[in-house]
Amino acid sequence: DIQMTQSPASLSASVGDRVTITCRASQSISSYVNWYQQRPGKAPKLLIYAASNLQSGVPSRFSGSGSGTDFTLTISSLQPEDFATYYCQQSYSSPQTFGQGTNLEIK
Amino acid sequence: EVQLVESGGGLVQPGGSLRLSCAASEFMFSSYWMSWVRQAPGKGLEWVANIKQDGNEKYYVDSVKGRFTISRDNAKNSLYLEMNSLRVEDTAVYYCARPRSSGSSRRAFDIWGQGTMVTVSS
């Protein structure tokens, strides 16, 4: 099975900050990485698919990059509604594992 | 509106069984791989299982193999998860999820249900 190692586990930042979350796969997975945002008590929401493609309706301050084993999610200028938990996921092969999550908190 | 609605969760004793359902609407259900994803209280997301359009390919996370069975009824636009020999560690919110395009299993999940809670406790 492919392991997804996500870091950091938690992150404190301020409105307007630029933040980056990383995910490393245990083997090469091409660009089959997706990023989700989850708010408490809600289902996850797709932000980025296939490593760098912005899902329809998602603000352009979110971006993704990477291929092979190393991937990043960047939020260019944090907004109050961005404080949530973020997950990477590999869809290269089943089981389609998720990273452990990054809890983004207000500083 | 494209929608997934889960049902069937509840409280069950260790060793018991439960069957979850996911009703799909406003898209061609039979054209999509479908998945179950769970989240234990206060924990991260865990992919559980997926099933091909015709039901002839199924994959499971190791922790549920031999105990859980994913199935579907395309005529009823419904996805199921039969859970047997339940353990305390199976306690979670269970979501069904649809990939953003039909055909392949290698697509991100753009449609999620609201989730159904399964509690395994004596």
Image (cartoon, coloured by chain):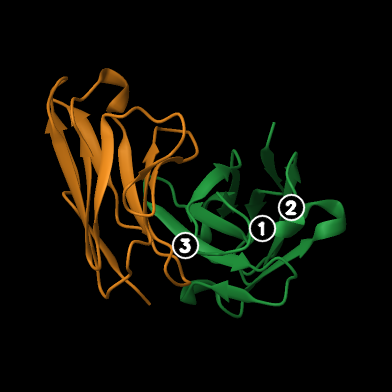
The answer to whether any part of residue A85 appears in the image is: yes
SS category of the residue bearing label 1: loop
Q: Amino acid at mark 2?
A: Phe
Give the x, y percent position of residue B119.
Answer: 57, 51
Whether residue B3 sits left or right of residue A57 in the image: it is right
Comparing labels 3 and 2, the label whose residue is closer to the camera: 2
Picture layout, residue B48 above or below residue B4? below
Q: Are marks 1 and 2 on the same chain?
A: yes
Residue A74: image quadrant is top left
Picture layout, residue A20 above or below residue A82? below
Please give the name of the residue rendered at 76% of the width and 62% of the height, measured from the top-left corner: B72
Q: CA distance from mark 3 to mark 2?
A: 31 Å
Give the x, y percent position of residue A36.
Answer: 38, 44
Residue A103: image quadrant is top left
Residue A47: image quadrant is top left
The residue labelled by disc 2 is: B29
Please give the name of the residue rendered at 51% of the width and 50% of the height, measured from the top-left corner: B109
Count of numbered marks? 3
Give the x, y percent position of residue B91.
Answer: 52, 55
Picture layout, residue A9 above or below residue B72? above
Q: Amino acid at mark 3?
A: Glu
* Chain orange in the figure, letter: A
* Chain green in the figure, letter: B
Where, quadrant-wise, is the N terminus of chain A in this rendering?
Answer: bottom left
Give the x, y percent position of residue B86.
Answer: 60, 67
Picture layout, residue A20 above or below residue A68? above
Q: Amino acid at mark 1?
A: Tyr
Where, quadrant-wise, is the C terminus of chain A in this rendering?
Answer: top left
Numbered disc 3: what chain? B
Mark 1, other Cα within 10 Å: few <14 / some 14–19 / many ≥20: many
The residue labelled by disc 3 is: B89
**Contact, mark 3 vs mark 1 (Cβ under 8 Å):** no
